[in-house]
Amino acid sequence: MTPDFLFQAMIYLAAAVIVVPLAKRLGLGSVLGYLLAGILIGPYLLGFIGEEGEELMHFAEFGVVMMLFLVGLELEPALLWRMRIPILGMGGMQVALSAVVLGGLAYLMGLSWQESTAVGLTFALSSTAIVLQTLGERGQLNSSGGRSSFAVLLFQDIAVIPILAVMPLLALGEIGADGEGHGGASGLLEGLPAGLRAGATLLAIAILVVAGRYLVPPLLRVVARARQRELLTGVALLLIVAVAVLMSAVGLSPALGSFLGGVVLANSYYKHELESDLEPFKGLLLGLFFMAVGASIDFGLIAARPGTVIGLVLLLVVVKALVLFVTGRVFGLAQDQNALFSFGLAQTGEFAFVLLSLIQQEGILPQSVVALLLVVVAVSMALTPLIMLVNARYIQPRFGVKESVDDAPPPEIEEPRRIIVAGFGGFGAVVGRFLGANGVRATILDNDSDRVDLLRRMGFEVYYGDATRFDLLETAGAAGAEAIVIGLPSPEQNLRLVETVKKHFPHLHQIVRAFDYPDTYDLMDAGVLHIFRDTLYSGVAAGKQTLKLLGVHAYRLERNGHRFFRHDLAALQTLAGMRFDEDLYVDAVRGSVADLEAQLRSDYDQGAYGEYGGWDIDGMAEEE
Amino acid sequence: MSNVLVLFAHPELERSRVHRSLITGLPQLSGVTFRDLYQLYPDFHIDVAREQELLLLHDFIIWQYPMNWYSMPPLLKQWIEMTFEYRWAYGPGGIYLRGKRVMNVLTAGGERDTYRPNRYNRFPVPEFLRPLQQTARRCGMEYLPPYVIHVTRQLASEQVDRERERYHTFLRGVVADRFDTADWQDIAYANEVLDLPNELR
């Protein structure tokens, strides 16, 4: 770790930490914030970073890979299958039309047909990173426009593979520099016959699916059993890196591969844990990626040829938006959703950086043109959050009809659960089963991997993870839930979770299991309203049964049981106030116990109807 | 020979003298099934299927309870509401109670003399039982006059013993079909069918 590296890290983190919150404050969104931070520290403003920006971008592209893994985790295979029509239909139409129109325009501007084809294909793609991040931040991923955007982006990720394969064929006879692995281009399989390559690709996907289904879950279980939180994070990272390596080896895009990996693991019960482990990495790496894009904008070139750059960017955005709009129309998107879809995808994506460097290496286009195009790519990406902001503020509101309820995402995507049960040991399991018996399905969190495994096999829907972590609560849907039942194995953990919930999800009702008096006091101090000492209820039930066996009438025991609960609660509240003075406390406890016993004894004489007993006892006394 | 089902409801048996005595030895009478509802269902959660099954096995039903505020204890009311289901006890297909005989056995704090016009209880005891009489009729049961024991608090313990003897004699008579219930229509209290002196009246 060189001081230089640390300095770089400091610059990036500082820029992000300062600029992004400001941008969010101004309602610009985090993506625009990161881009601005990148521009700020880039070579043309503060000059903290220079040439290494490009290299950094390759590293930061890993954030995109992670993002797609996380997107995949949310998409179960069945859902993906249901989306096959928008993916193939909309995606295919958008890529083909955009490539033809953009290529045609390039041809009209005087490029050769090979050059035009390369440019058209490159610019037909959009930016998965920017679009998904922006949509996610605005909560629009599940609108019909958002889902269409996702479908098209997914198709583009697949389309990159044949496009990468086609590029060398477009080289004008001149054999470019040797095809040494760039980005997603194939490394290991270089020079193999096409048939073998295709076979290897299929094999890699098969490996991915089989490993995801049969190898990874047991691995996660073993690691989880070690109870080292950082190990699980390590496994999550290892998974993604391994998938990326495997996919790169056969020439598939790592992003697509990790997306597939995510889908395979979408049914796993470690899903929430994986999500919350990777989320911060994804966020920071994506941020880094956006900063790198910002820093890579060549303001020198813009200053030299402002008209050309602005003209090309405008042309690109307008043409792509039009093509998208037509596509959305054909597939029946409502107007406001179509606007979101069209403006959202109107930029060129991060794949363009890869493709353009390939184009240059293959000698398809001269370096000067490629440099110009790179600026266009970066500027169009940087403009996207702005365009989407303008769309949301000024264009979409003009369509009177917002997306109607009917168009809302089908509930099976992510059925919001109203209850979270944290800790599925004895207490939580009973609560969970009771809720289930009443038709209320709860999200269950437990961090005993053996138990999770067992419960899973018994048919319960249980997720692995430490429920006291804020991020896990968030992925478990705490924001949308109504109540949380807390029954973790120790009072300390319970208290920690109570505090976390109070801080981040104050809207949740908290139903908390307590163990003994001191623990109950702590929970009362923390402001918990619904406290259940599990031993209290089973203890009284056992006491009732014992006395019943001695011949005491069941209904009398029923009444006394309730009396006992009521008295115990009152005593608890009195005692809570004096528990720091031991003498006082002991006296009060003694008094309280004596009190309760006296009360119950008097019930022996008084029965259910108070001092005078039942109704009309003296038989003739009161005449009217 | 009749099978008798005694459904007993007393919310505070531990303080009752008369009922405790009345039910002593009662479960041992042959032909009698005794059910202490407050013992069986202290939480008021009645096992309807079990109760209906027992009703099917008996042809003479007795509701035994202390009368409080001119009515039966809440658990017995709950029992009737839960057990006498539509399409089982009444309504289409509700035939399972038809032809059974049913009666109330109850204790009342006030003297019998106070249950008449111009006295503070104003109505005779059978008038307060009208809802039960109509319930029985809706279900096709034969409703019999009540067996009533008055001024229970004033009874000396030998009187209580005597009341138990009379009640058990009565029950044995019912089991043995010694009474012709067709003759009961003219009497106010079922106690009168016993050929015994009744100084309480």
Image: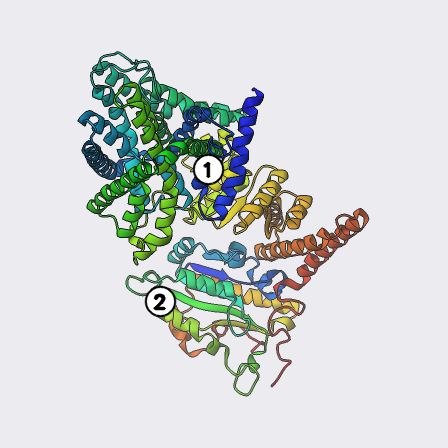
Front residue of this view, candidates A141 and A270: A141
Chain hosting mark 1: A
Task: Indicate the colouring scheme.
Answer: rainbow
Q: Disc count in the image?
A: 2
Q: Residues within 10 Å of mark 1 (few under 14, many from 20)?
A: many
Q: Amino acid at mark 2?
A: Cys
Judging by the rendered image, the residue that carries numbered circle 2 is B139
Q: Residues within 10 Å of mark 2 (few under 14, many from 20)?
A: many
* Left or right position of A431 against A405: right
Residue A177's place in the image compared with B19, above or below, is above
* Left or right position of B195 against A73: right
* Identity of the residue drawn at 32% across and 13% down: A188
Residue A44 picture location, percent across and down: 46, 33
Picture quadrant of residue A426: top right
Residue A404 picture location, percent across and down: 30, 55
Front residue of this view, candidates A432 and B51: A432
Residue A583's place in the image compared with B162, above or below, is above
Q: Amino acid at mark 1?
A: Tyr
Judging by the rendered image, the residue that carries numbered circle 1 is A34
Element at label 2 = loop
Residue depth check, mark 1 versus mark 2: number of the one nearer the observer: 1
Residue A552's place in the image compared with A348, above or below, is below
Q: Is label 1 in contact with label 2 (beta carbons under 8 Å)?
A: no
